[in-house]
């Protein structure tokens, strides 16, 4: 999905994903429009991603390079899709938040009655995920520096 992201999808710090296919955009998996809050670090990375040509190929090459550098046997983009929701629940935000951010259909009665948009909550969640990931990278970097 990130490879097909378009500049007009980024609105007010959210990635607004149209449910239907448009141009290179494949549409969302469940056929519902979706918004994901973007942390400041994510917004900075996305600007470079959108500016790069052949971003899909570039992203694939970067993932392969990272996997090789870290000595990981195998990683797919879908592994990253699982990692974010797992991190959301690990950080204590719960499955409702995880389902909402991952755009999972829950078919719950609350889907009918709860019309709150969760913008502020989702921004806090994604900022916490970004801090967590940055912390992991910084610890790894400090450890690598210490070991060399």
Image (spheres, rainbow, N blue to C red):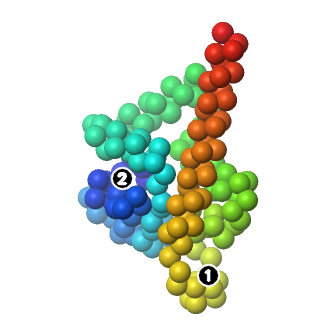
Q: CA distance from mark 1 to mark 2?
A: 27 Å
- Secondary structure of the residue carrying tag 1 is loop
**What's the residue at 49%, 51% (across, down)?**
39
How many numbered discs, if any? 2
Is 19 placed left or right of 99 in the picture?
left
Q: In the rendered view, would you say 134 is above or below 65?
A: below
- Residue 82, percent across and down? 63, 52
Q: What residue is at 50 percent from the left and 33 percent from the top?
A: 63
Q: Position of residue 33 (x, y in %)?
A: 42, 71
Give coordinates of residue 19: x percent, y percent.
39, 69
Q: Earlier in the sequence, mark 1 or mark 2?
A: 2
Q: Which residue is mark 2?
A: 5
Q: Is residue 65 left or right of residue 7?
A: right
Give the camera-side residue of 25 and 113: 113
The residue located at (56%, 89%) in the rendering is 112
Would residue 103 be visible to someone looking at this image? no
Q: Using the rendered image of the protein, determine whether residue 121 is visible from the camera's viewpoint.
A: yes
């Amino acid at each position: 999905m990130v490879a097909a992201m378009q500049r007009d999808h980024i609105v007010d710090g959210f990635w607004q994903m149209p449910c239907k296919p448009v141009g290179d955009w494949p549409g969302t998996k469940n056929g519902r429009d979706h918004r994901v809050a973007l942390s400041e670090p994510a917004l900075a990375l996305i600007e470079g991603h959108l500016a790069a040509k052949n971003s899909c190929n570039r992203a694939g090459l970067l993932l392969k390079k990272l996997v090789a550098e870290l000595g990981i046997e195998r990683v797919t983009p879908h592994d990253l899709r699982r990692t974010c929701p797992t991190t959301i629940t690990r950080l204590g935000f719960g499955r409702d938040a995880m389902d909402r951010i991952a755009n999972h259909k829950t078919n719950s009665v609350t889907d009918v009655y709860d019309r709150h948009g969760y913008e502020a909550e989702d921004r806090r969640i994604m900022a916490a995920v970004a801090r967590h990931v940055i912390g992991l990278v910084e610890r790894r970097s400090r450890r690598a520096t210490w070991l060399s």
